[in-house]
Amino acid sequence: MSDADDVAFGDTLLSVDGLTKHFTDDGGFLGGLTIDMDDGFSVAYDRDSVRAVEEVSFDIRKGETLGLVGESGCGKSTLARTILRLLEPTDGNVYFKGRNLAEIGGEELRSQRKDMQMIFQDPQSSLDPRMKVGRIVEEPMKAHGLYGDAEGREERAKELLEKVGLDPQHYNRYPHAFSGGQRQRVNLARALSVNPDFIVCDEPVSALDVSIQAQVLNTMNELQAEFGLTYLFIAHDLSVIRHISDRVAVMYLGQLVELADKEELFENPQHPYTRALLSSIPVPDPRAKGTRGVLEGDVPSPIDPPSGCRFRTRCPELIAPPEYDLTPAEWENIRTFTRAVDRRAFEAASVDAVRERFFDDAVPYGEAGTVVDEAIGLVCTDDWESAATLLRERFAEQSICAREEPAYEVPTEHGDSRHFAACHLHKTDLDEVH
Amino acid sequence: MNGTDPLLEVRDLKTQFFTAEGTVRAVDGISFTVEEGEIVGIVGESGAGKSVAASSILRLIENPGEIVGGEVRYRGETLVGFEQRDGELRERDDMLSNEAVRKRIRGREIAIIFQDPMESLNPVFTVGGQLREFIEINRDLPESEAREEAVDMLREVGIPEPVKRFDDYPHQFSGGMRQRVLIAMALACEPSLIIADEPTTALDVTVEGQILDLVEDLQQKYGTSFIWVTHDMGVVAEICDRVNVMYLGEIVEQASVDDLFHETKHPYTAALLDSMPRPDETVEELNPIEGVMPEAINPPSGCRFHPRCPDAREVCVNVHPENRAVAEGEIHPHRAACLQHEEVFRAGYWGSQPLDDAERAQRHRELTADGGGADE
Amino acid sequence: MATTSDTQSDEMLSSGREEGGVEEEEIESRVGISYTLWQIRRDPTALAGLAIISVMTAIAVFAYIDAVIFDRLSDYAFFANMGVEQYWFANNYWVNPEHDPASVRSLLPPAWMENTFGQGTWDHPLGTDHRGRDILVRLFYGTRIAIQVGFISTAIGMVGGTLVGAVSGYYGGWIDDALMRAVETLYAIPFLVLVIAFMTAFGRDLTYAMIGVGITTIPVFARLIRSRVVSVREEDYVEAARAAGVRDRNIILRHVIPNSFAPVLVQATLQIGVSILIVAGLSFLGFGVQPPKPSWGQMLSQSRGYMLPNPWFSVWPGVAILITVVGFNLLGDGLRDALDPRVNN
């Protein structure tokens, strides 16, 4: 292709800048109305919004694979769809070859899609069951008026089927006659049919068996080399990410928490969430047993995410509020106690029993001690709610993690790429990015 | 019962599905044992028959499937037993009736946990209610005691605020929490064996980690045995004591978990391990297994893995290897079904001509008709 | 020819490579509505419905041809006693063969019965009406109108409803709100009132009856397909098409509608029966088919005054409507079963 706006390898192809996507509950045009009959008759109009993606920024260079990893519900698929403008961004910009995708629309956007394609997770549902694979592969070409007439397109489709490792004679078959891995290859062929620069791969191998997964991953690597493709590769499986990516971004609850070169991220993770994620993968080696760390609790709701660092509610390294001057052991005990109160995970028999159970080795003194005593008292009178609120307000929410949003650049140990980590542990001697 | 008998013994179990396209030999003569307090893995790709094998143990096979042969013995009771009589395969007299299995065995002695917790819980009843009812029925407790027991179980499996969450409906729980509820349900009657059919497949890694930890803790506390069905070698390495690797309805390798990973005796297991990307090191090039698993309607002749096997030779096309002991193990011998182990099989493997790639590709195409086949 | 068949059988014989021929066909044919339709061959309910509809349609077509070929001044044909030589079939076989005005006998019972007007005759197997016209012949020609009305009005409703529903469901948001509220407004008015108002405004004849009934059935189809489209819209292949840059119009026509159409087809079949019933009702009320054109509803209407002397005059058009509607309902039920994935798999 001889586009004027061609980007050289290694230069920024796509730049995401402060991208935000909120979903509002779509209950029809009266959906947001609430009528309150208790205090007279008041009508309120407001909608809860799910803050799926919040202020995400990163660049992708031409020819590289950026891995995007996170647990289900962290917003990685939403991010991908917002980048491609399959969803309307709430805020922020996406520059693709210098053009802001967030601002264009209609026919301009549609013709831009020729350069950026997507591969989906579910090989079952991503192909129209009523269409033959030949037509499926030809559809994007047809939509952009490429490869001349029907004959030219058929030839191209067959060529592509062969490229992705399928028999071109299967041109006239329906998707259901193919296995999962083969369907994913049809998906690849469809994405390649318009000669894109950039392909978003949304969990392309997670529905496949291990042995098939390896086949498809290898094919994707070969195609990338052959066509000079740039991938944004989304997965929840860190092993796959480690295999295919050049750089890796880790997402938690709608935000990027860490972004670094692959080796750097896996060997020198700087965010507690990344570390937790890495240590919770079962390693396929029984001799590596016992190294697994476990992250407690569930992901909070994205409707009302925690203030400051969104990971702080589960973070094993939550920073102690400076005003109390707590020792690490005391802080640890306070947090264990807070978690237990939140979850009502124990029976509160007496003040002493509780004290013994949670504050055996290190008892906080001073102001912190008073708060703890008060909380234990509340728990013992069965007022769990107040105890939990008290502990939360006086400790967790006093931490810097709750008050400021973290964004730091940390020194890189492996490779020479910049290493971004959103954790206040790096505050001490480093400059903030923003 | 004496101490040396295994808790569960499966011998030559066969389960088939009778479909319009033909007879699917989903489980084709598998044998394994589960000792007290042991976690035994069944691992394989989708379509290998591992879930069918798990369900067959509790006779949970539904039409058009049927257990057609073999024996499953649990603590001296015959859950499944067939014998050859008058030239016909028949159920043995000592085989428990359906009712006995339902009332005495399922839930009380052997519990089962499925992959999708949403399908195992009824969406219109509260979680606590379902758990309470289960306990009430299976342990003959009055309602109030059963309720207390249910709350205790929920707390035990780490459900936060168990008293409050007791009256929540399944959709109000996250996936991991629902799986915890199912584990609570499985544990409620303190069974001796729990069959877990891909219980963590649908969960995120961090949640999976939580569940695996929970299972390990509970297993130590109650001494429950597990049969853990999974496709994930990582999970196997993490929690299993012994492993059965299944391919196309057969167990191709059977070993302790350490031997399986470090003294691999079957090319399929080796290839499976080789094809996985690793979380702990960067692998530049993956070595996938060629092709896909053929369908179990018309399995390949000889060794069923030979069309995809990098080490296949002429003899593999014709001779079907039984699963035999090929090496010593800690307690049980290391068994494998591969003719490479000449000293055991004596099929003349090393003297035989290796299958070249073209030939193998050809055979594979024939078997799968289109190089893949439908996998509906 | 021999060589071809030889190669074919050779291919069949070489086992293992049997992917060509039969199997290929099988795979192909399993997709799409045509295969599903073929499924109903095993369903006795649907077959019974299909048989009834086939017979009815055959009669309608025959009556249509007869009318077109032999008659331009249709209506007078049924005044058989006037001796007009139209409706060749009717004239020759059922209507007063002698063409003798004196021999007209009105309100005769069916052939095997007797009433105050005399003994039934095999010249008029089902009897005659108040003007001495043969009831069977009029039923016969009425079939043409019933079938025509059923198909055309349902087609109008189906096409309109499918487009409205698909657009509404695909785009969602305010388009959905606007279209669906409009459709619901249409739903909220009793359809008979709506059709009568429509016909009063535009004209009382059959064409407007069909259009009116068609429009009033749009909501049924629109809501039905919308509910399917809302889930099909979420399928990855629709998103894939959008991501590939396919135009919305093509996505709706190529992906969304074909994959949402099965329930519409079932509903259409059932709706034909309902439409026939509605138009019969309209004719009964004096809207739609104008006398002396023979329509079932209008026949029923005319028979009102003669219930006591010849109840059969009322019974036969009723039976005709019943059988036709039941026929379409049976077929619709059969189709529903065949297209329902839960029953199928």
Image (spheres, rainbow, N blue to C red):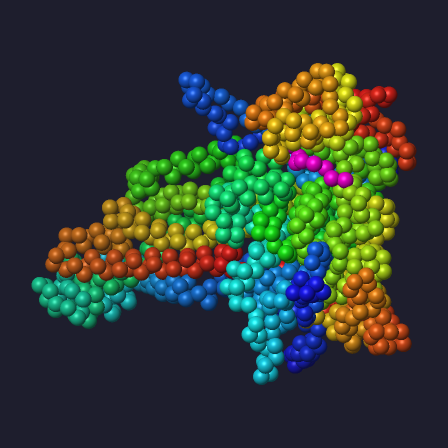
Q: Which residues are magenta?
A: A293-305
Query: In this view of the protein, which residue sits in the foreground, B71 or C239?
Result: B71
Q: Is residue A230 above or below residue C83?
A: above
Q: Residue at x 61, y 61 (%)?
A: B55
Q: Nearer the viewer, residue A240 or C160?
A: A240
Q: The N terminus of chain B appears in which quarter of the rendering?
A: bottom right
Q: At which x and y percent is residue A427?
A: 82, 22
Q: Is residue A372 visible?
A: yes
Instruction: Name the residue nearer the viewer: B140 or C268.
Output: B140
Q: Is residue C186 above or below residue A140?
A: above
Q: Main secondary structure of the magenta part?
A: loop
Q: Residue at horizontal 73%, vertical 21%? A: A364
Q: In the drawing, does residue B58 fall left or right of residue A232? A: left
Decide if residue A304 is on the left or right side of residue B325: left
The answer to whether A345 is drawn above or below residue B131 in the figure is above
Q: Is residue C89 above or below residue A268?
A: below
Farthest-out residue, bottom: B86
